[in-house]
Image (cartoon, helix red, strand yellow):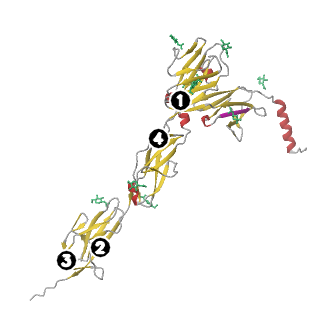
Amino acid sequence: MVKLPPLKILFIIKCGLLSFVHSQHLQISTRFMSGNVIFTWTPSNHSSHFILITRDTTRDKIWTRVTDTQYTVRDVLLYDNITINVRTPGSATDNRMAYNVFKIKIKVGDTVNLSWTAPFFPVAGLYIVYHTYRENRTVFRIESSGVSYGGYNQSSKYTYLTRPCNSTNIMFEIRDITLDDAGYYNGGSNDEAAWSGGGVVLIVHNKPSKPKITGDLNVEVNNATSLTCSSQSTSVPDYYSKLLTLSHTWLVNETKMGREIRDTLRLKVTKDFKYNKYSCTATEDVMESDRSDPVQINPLYGPDRPKITPEPVLNVNGKLTVREGETIGPFVCIADCNPPCNITWRVQGSDGFSDACSEMGTLLQQAVQRDIQLFQCIADRGDKTLKQSIQLDVQCKYFIGI
Ligand SMILES: *[C@@H]1O[C@H](CO)[C@@H](O)[C@H](O)[C@H]1NC(C)=O
Ligand SMILES: *[C@@H]1O[C@H](CO)[C@@H](O)[C@H](O)[C@H]1NC(C)=O
Ligand SMILES: *[C@@H]1O[C@H](CO)[C@@H](O)[C@H](O)[C@H]1NC(C)=O
Ligand SMILES: *[C@@H]1O[C@H](CO)[C@@H](O)[C@H](O)[C@H]1NC(C)=O
Ligand SMILES: *[C@@H]1O[C@H](CO)[C@@H](O)[C@H](O)[C@H]1NC(C)=O
Ligand SMILES: *[C@@H]1O[C@H](CO)[C@@H](O)[C@H](O)[C@H]1NC(C)=O
Ligand SMILES: *[C@@H]1O[C@H](CO)[C@@H](O)[C@H](O)[C@H]1NC(C)=O
Ligand SMILES: *[C@@H]1O[C@H](CO)[C@@H](O)[C@H](O)[C@H]1NC(C)=O
Ligand SMILES: *[C@@H]1O[C@H](CO)[C@@H](O)[C@H](O)[C@H]1NC(C)=O
């Protein structure tokens, strides 16, 4: 049995492969579609190809095997140029194609000049400029007889600026830009030709929608809450605006809060937050949204130990000395709570607690019976209750009958 070292086997196989493979030159074409670029190459005798994409200066780390004769690079508006390199299996021959992503950003109401270089000007003398976003339409036609804007020799919206008309440097002006003007512009002798490579994407910037603030506004004091500022880009085309992240500004009353730019604001709530008004804006590039409607946090707190007024004058035992049959009160009981506490009064006699005669948190004036041990004010905020008591030292009257 002959044993060959593995390295040698590899070498032989590789040489064998190389000797059969011809370096193939692939024709690659490009097509811009809704924010993506589709690279298509001429079919070869191979069922699969290896591709490597470079976005600006960032090159894919690994080759991707594709079984189709096309490949879509998504969200190309994030870049200035996209390059594809296609290799047939086993070949080291590069087939490169670059796509330059021409984009212009402007605002509603502006006037803009769009320009690109056509690969050639059609000999037949007809060059059509198209615009596509949600639908395809002809912007104008350059004919040997002149420029035709939908049958007219001039337009209030567009002006073809290139002289001579048949130059490959295509340039035209668009006035009074609206959101409807956004999209992809390109030209050719027919629409099929127009969608292959080149052209310009016109991005129309608009201020983001007025934000809405959401979050838990009823917050226990010392707890944290998160407010979220939600707004959407209204720039077009949407295949551009979906790539954006908005930055946010938070305001308390009329004052900007620090450098907070995230869409959520985290706050540790204190009692005096109830006077603060929070609002936010969203910004895309330099376009700032209208300010959101303000929101106010409702800090939940209390009760503290209830306070009784007038303050009872207590004896050394901490009790209010009172003679049987004498009246006490009225006593007002208050407690600092949000939402306001329910204040009730109870009285403890020899047979336990019962409701005392009170009205709106005030213990009404009443005669003291001998078995009364204390009056108690209860401040109740649902799950939290605090009490304050007045202990009585009732001096009994003894009638010495004859
Ligand atoms: C591809 O196949 C065709 C016929 O099937 C052949 O004529 C041609 O030479 C092949 N090309 C390469 C590059 O192998
Ligand atoms: C495209 O990107 C490459 C880098 O990947 C750069 O060298 C080249 O100049 C760019 N081309 C254009 C037209 O911007
Ligand atoms: C467009 O180009 C024309 C001719 O070069 C120039 O007069 C005009 O000011 C340009 N418009 C804009 C908006 O740049
Ligand atoms: C625009 O025209 C191209 C080429 O004919 C076609 O592929 C595409 O689907 C059309 N787009 C719309 C929105 O009609
Ligand atoms: C446009 O056509 C009208 C006649 O339809 C003509 O009077 C006018 O001079 C033409 N304008 C230009 C700029 O060619
Ligand atoms: C443009 O038209 C002129 C005159 O008709 C002609 O001489 C010239 O070659 C044309 N240029 C192109 C790029 O077709
Ligand atoms: C406040 O925080 C405490 C502890 O984190 C939690 O148990 C409680 O549910 C919170 N209360 C409210 C109203 O969010
Ligand atoms: C916001 O305004 C209210 C009412 O004018 C004031 O009580 C509160 O202290 C202010 N908050 C801040 C953080 O300035
Ligand atoms: C206060 O009393 C009213 C009437 O009895 C009741 O509806 C309410 O829920 C009470 N509030 C609290 C915080 O206990």
Report the Cα–Cα distance between label 2 and label 1: 74 Å
Q: Quadrant of the N terminus?
A: top right
Badge 3: residue crowd in 10 Å (few <14, some 14–19, many ≥20): some
Where does label 3 land, which residue? 369
Question: Tag 2: residue type?
Answer: Ser
Q: Are marks 2 and 4 in contact (CB under 8 Å)?
A: no
Q: Earlier in the sequence, mark 2 or mark 1?
A: 1
Q: Which residues are magenta?
A: 81-86
Instruction: Please provide percent x and percent y for residue 168.
Output: 65, 20
Where does label 1 land, which residue? 182
Instruction: Please provide percent x and percent y for residue 82.
Output: 67, 34
Badge 1: residue crowd in 10 Å (few <14, some 14–19, many ≥20): many
Tell me which residue sits at (16%, 85%) in the image: 398
Ligand 7 is found in the corner quadrant, namely bottom left
Report the Cα–Cα distance between label 3 and label 1: 88 Å
The extreme right residue here reads: 2
Is residue 24 positioned above or below 350 on the image?
above
The secondary element bearing badge 1 is classed as loop
In magenta stretch: residue 82: yes
Quarter of the view holding residue 101: top right
Q: Disc 3 vs disc 4: which is toward the camera?
A: 4
Q: Quadrant of the C terminus?
A: bottom left
Report the Cα–Cα distance between label 2 and label 4: 56 Å
Report the Cα–Cα distance between label 3 and label 2: 17 Å
Q: Are marks 3 and 1 in contact (CB under 8 Å)?
A: no
Q: Earlier in the sequence, mark 3 or mark 2?
A: 3
Is residue 74 visible from the viewing direction of this image?
Answer: no
Where does label 2 land, which residue? 389
The secondary element bearing badge 4 is classed as loop
State yes or no: Cβ of the residue under disc 2 lies below 8 Å from any atom of ligand 9: no
Q: Disc 1 vs disc 4: which is toward the camera?
A: 4
Q: Disc 2 vs disc 4: which is toward the camera?
A: 4
